[in-house]
Amino acid sequence: MRPVPTPQQEELRAAVRDLCSREVTVERLLVWEGASDASELALLESIAALGWLGLGVPVAAGGSGACLSDVAILVSECARGLVPRSIIGAVRGATALGVIAPKSSVLASLATGDNRLAMAVDEEEARVASSFSTTVEVEGGVPRVRGAKAYVPDAALSELHLVVARDGQGPVLALTEAGGPGVTIRELRTFGGDRQAHVRYDGAPVVERIEGGPAAFGRLQEVRQALALAEMVGGMDAVLDATVAYVQEREQFGQKIALFQAVRHQIADMGIRVTAARHLAWQAITRIDRRALCGHELASALAYTGRAFRDVCVTGHHLHGGAGFVVENRLRFHSERAQSLAIRYACEAPALEEIAGALLD
Amino acid sequence: MRPVPTPQQEELRAAVRDLCSREVTVERLLVWEGASDASELALLESIAALGWLGLGVPVAAGGSGACLSDVAILVSECARGLVPRSIIGAVRGATALGVIAPKSSVLASLATGDNRLAMAVDEEEARVASSFSTTVEVEGGVPRVRGAKAYVPDAALSELHLVVARDGQGPVLALTEAGGPGVTIRELRTFGGDRQAHVRYDGAPVVERIEGGPAAFGRLQEVRQALALAEMVGGMDAVLDATVAYVQEREQFGQKIALFQAVRHQIADMGIRVTAARHLAWQAITRIDRRALCGHELASALAYTGRAFRDVCVTGHHLHGGAGFVVENRLRFHSERAQSLAIRYACEAPALEEIAGALLD
Amino acid sequence: MDYELSPREQAWREEVREFIGEHVDEALADETRQRGNEGRGPRAQLFLDALRDRGWWGLAWPEEYGGLGKTALEQWIFIDEIESAGAPMLPLTVTSVAPTIMRIGSQEQKRDWLPKIQAGEIEFALGYSEAEAGTDLASLKTRAELDGDEWVVNGAKMWNTMAHHATHNWLAVRTEPDARKHKGISMMIVPMDAPGVSVQPIWVWPGLRTNALFLDNVRVPRSYLIGERGMGFYYAAMALNFERLSIGSIGMARRHFRALVDEVRRRVVDGRPLREDPWVRERLARLQIEIDAAGMLGLETAWALDQGRVPAAESSMAKIYVSELSQRIADVGCEILGLNGQLHADEARALAGGRMQWLYRLSPMLAFGGGTNEVQRDIIGFMGFGLPRK
Amino acid sequence: MDYELSPREQAWREEVREFIGEHVDEALADETRQRGNEGRGPRAQLFLDALRDRGWWGLAWPEEYGGLGKTALEQWIFIDEIESAGAPMLPLTVTSVAPTIMRIGSQEQKRDWLPKIQAGEIEFALGYSEAEAGTDLASLKTRAELDGDEWVVNGAKMWNTMAHHATHNWLAVRTEPDARKHKGISMMIVPMDAPGVSVQPIWVWPGLRTNALFLDNVRVPRSYLIGERGMGFYYAAMALNFERLSIGSIGMARRHFRALVDEVRRRVVDGRPLREDPWVRERLARLQIEIDAAGMLGLETAWALDQGRVPAAESSMAKIYVSELSQRIADVGCEILGLNGQLHADEARALAGGRMQWLYRLSPMLAFGGGTNEVQRDIIGFMGFGLPRK
């Protein structure tokens, strides 16, 4: 029992924080909202150079071979510092592939940042894998992907796509080239300004098939969710810190607004939510890391953390008032990510049903 | 649009309030919690003498022929003043029968208080009428009731039972005599100290069968729910008033606790809930009265008011602290009724499902 | 007790609905959403002209000023219907500035300004808040000093939303620096083309523009101070009174909720109608209950106004309820729509018109703007329940 | 980051569970519930004796006093298991009074009192609160004046829960009337059989008895003032520190929730298993999440204690969470059980042992007692986030 980072993790954290304070300025955030630019690529390169893209990639594949919890520390701190989602996505892609396919031939290129991996999971009309309509089938001796994936993060920025498809049995995982034949990418405007796309795979050839079947897919989901928890916790911390600072600085009616009991109590309630969420999240992350998840605890952590992050953002906005509402304030970037992460990784309904199932069925 | 009582209703209200302030003392409440006593009977007789038992009974049957809204005013004020539930139940029984069977031969005796009517609706394993197992069947030329009813309020105090049963088709309503053959009453200890019982009807003869079939049952439910709304609103008002008074009287840390913003804001939130509930409830009551309910509005009023009453009680207890926690404080009687009324009349799940049905199906 | 509209009120509702049926379509609602605070589009202008032709600009004005003198309940019906249809609301110039001038202005001031407002020739931005004086309006620092027959105005205003389209600003300024802070403020009209007035855009999260307004030795005639000197704080409070019905209106929330419900009725996910999902059913039913409750609070505010009371507590209740409920609708809406809920409103595939994410971004403002919900709760305590002030 | 129990902690948990398995049955849990505050029943006495024989009374005591010096996390495990099993908790005499005496008492005082506590010969009621000094403890008025070698105590205490069974009272009294109010209080032991001590029962809503304690010229030896004069307020705060793990423990809530879940798994309503009802599933799942969250806050409190910190903010968080959650469990529980949920626990047919309505009545006390949740939120603001005090 040691619900705080190790000294090494604290070092990593400090390094990320330092990088963010230098590189992630509000001016850049406003630019990155529109499109990737040179400064975003430069930041990606810096992060690659620090070895962070390959942090969770096995040493044999050119990475650092760190555990998932260490990668989660990195991701959490990147989220806190508002590192572009495309870069967090690159870390996520490399880590996920590192976990489910530690011998994949493309891993080395992900660790260096030469390639990026987008994960094409969701479909427009399907929320569970058993409803996916995308398939992998052998045509003319070559396995090919057919189908449409929706809301694929960074699809156009990434050289490789990891597509979750079906082969007549369970879900299978196939790598394709984003620039290869049969891949059509249509970018979407999302309210959070991240870069998602609808992707059609019309017989796109499979570069590499990930072995492991449904278990590999299950593990992929766990890793994605673990890193989403890390992102949420990092963002939540940032919002709480910013709000605590603001209420001690802003004056109305002749006093710091922190002196109003109603304000203090909202901070206290934010604190409770953030604290509980942090521990639930890290407990789940560390147990995913050591493959020791029990029962409903991932569902519980996701549902609680997703809700808490959004609620904390709402309170943060409320206490910031107009000052937090201008587009230049970092707060709203966190609020966008809160909603976006919750929608993708922490939907309440399936989590509740999983927990209910564990309790009652 | 006149979301306040009429002058006549205000007069009735004042008369009830006056009676309660004289007759409903804490000492008596503590006695009545254990069992009916002479003072409770005397209060029943006073109320009967004032014509209030028969307020909603048609003039032709010896009542005052007032509308349901007027009865609701009476009930609401009785609830506010903590008139024993058995007496509110007598009003409810007479009113309900007056509405669904205005020519019933027993009405006159209910209006005078010579008889009381208990309503035997719920069953242990059934929440909806279509699952009721109690039947009315003709045996030896006489219609008889067979089955078990659960949690029947005031079953042992009442001379007559209105039993909701089935006759092979929809629900039917049958009057039986509580003291007649084939009726076994087993009283229950309930946490609210009201007087409920399990009742077995083993071929109890039907004294009178209420015509109107399922429609009459539907109307019965509406009337019961309307009066439950009135009870809830009256109780809620009492809790809010008591709490507002208490926070202006209690001092801690050298000041009235009302001066703490966190306390004030809890009062404000109680006020919002009570105000919204009051209007939702009275809108539903008045529309039930004029048979003009639209869509989901009764479900909405019940769900909101039931939840609000319980929440307001919880906040009331919280702000009263120890002072409201002693058995002699009226607050806890209201809290008991809040839970009891919500469980019987304002369950959330069916209300939500009805509303969802109206929206989506 | 009676919760029914009178035949006259019912007829009025029908009349408003009919008007809306004739003049509002999706294209107008889309234009209104897309323009945000970027001034009126052509469709909105047509709509507002039609409202004026109908005499409805003067809906809430006393009859002596050519108004219809509608009751508060009738105004509430109007606001509810307009908002619920997604049509543009009457400008604050008409609903807030004009009625204030009618009550506090001199005969001359009324003669100077009201006809121009009635003709739609001028439009005001409202300049109350400053960077350091938001909820605490009485602390404002923008000052005006008399120099001969002219006021010289210096200072800066924040959240001066319509400044980049308005012809004039309706400004709260400190004219009595030595008086107690509530007693030192006056209301003043400043033409936007006066030398020394400048506007700087401020973009806020929902994609809306507002402005900072800078006043650098701006000179306006003495007569542009409206009403009495030093009474500005109370005039601002009076203006608030005219907005009580709007700030607690549930119309907009209901419209967005309806769009969400419509989408749920249509949508199929994982091969199953979304409306069969128990979680979706439960969430939507809960929101419906809350919408019903919020509606009653608005109705009570209107009714209290018609009784001649200042429904401070009632309108604060409605404001709190609607603002907090809007946030919940947005949250539930985003989750129900799933990943699609993130799509920008301009994406053709965005379900429910992309409104849920927009409402998610807008709602915080509803809670902290227009007097934070903390202040509203204080007001409820003081005014509604007689709790002591500090 | 690491959330796993160490092998030693895991073994300790197993040991506690094994002990509970041997010594706790439904009859003991029923007796504990039925007796309320009416003193220990025979089964509870046996259980507590067994705990003492095992040396577990000294679980949290320093080793120099014959204690086991268990870590906070180990104590937390113990509390969690005992509560979750519904067994009687160690008396406050053992968990709160004794450790305070160990830290503040003179050698003589320790020699006088600790062996009797260890032997179970004496038991204390805790006399802090007064009618006008609840959350605001420093305002207490009960006073003690030196008269020769004796203190003369006069005043009244409220919520003196164990007074009618205790042999002694552990009393906060004002001994320095001229000092500032926090500095004028001392801790004193008053034998219950001293002339002038009287007890009046107070019954509270959940059916529990507590007492008012009256002190009328009660004389106690000078040496019965424990520790230093005027330090009583701080000693009370110290005692609170020993209770931090208990007040935020989720064990009881979890036990009641488990009883509810078990009942749902068994029950059939309208011909359909209750566990298939989507509303029931949703409610229970939400409660489970909250229980998980509350558990983490308790764990953090224990961990922080073991780091040598006073986890004021952490334990306040846990206290708020558990108290508010208990109310929700009770509400959901009552509604799920339906009309049966109203049955008194003594009715054989009462589902889940009639616990839901009992918890409904008990929970308000959890929120206002032990320092109201308002004060806890203030503490979180000050201690957890460095917000300014008034």
Image (tube, coloured by chain):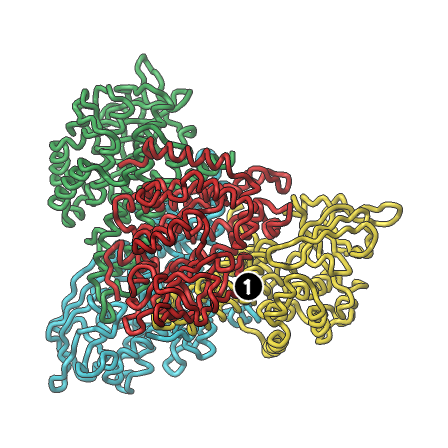
Chain colours: A yellow, B green, C red, D cyan
- As drawn, the residue found furthest toward the front would be C148
* Whether residue A251 is situated above or below residue C238 in the rendered picture: below
Taking the image as drawn, is residue D378 in sight? Answer: no
Callout 1 crowding tier (Cα within 10 Å): few <14, some 14–19, many ≥20: some
Q: Which residue is more in the foreground, B5 or D93?
A: B5
Q: Which residue is more in the foreground, C142 or D329?
A: C142
- As drawn, the residue found furthest toward the top would be B141
* Whether residue D201 is situated above or below residue C120 in the rendered picture: below
Q: Which residue is more in the foreground, A247 or A128?
A: A247
Amino acid found under the numbered disc labelled 1: Val
* Whether residue D308 is situated above or below residue A320 in the rendered picture: below
Side (left or right) of B286 relative to C38? left
| Residue B201, quarter of the rendered image | top left
Where the N terminus of chain B falls, by quadrant?
top left
Side (left or right) of C132 relative to A27? left
Q: Which residue is more in the foreground, B94 or A286?
A: B94
Determine the residue positioned at 45% across, 54% down: C123
Determine the residue positioned at 17% across, 46% down: B29
Residue B269 at x, y percent in the picture: 33, 54
| Residue A69, quarter of the rendered image | bottom right
Residue C361 at x, y percent in the picture: 52, 56
Determine the residue positioned at 61% across, 70% down: A27
Determine the residue positioned at 42% across, 56% down: D255
* Whether residue C325 is situated above or below residue B302 in the rendered picture: below
Residue A130 at x, y percent in the picture: 67, 45
Residue A48 at x, y percent in the picture: 72, 72
Taking the image as drawn, is residue B140 in sight? Answer: yes
In the picture of the structure, the residue carrying the numbered disc 1 is A327
Helix, strand or loop for disc 1: loop
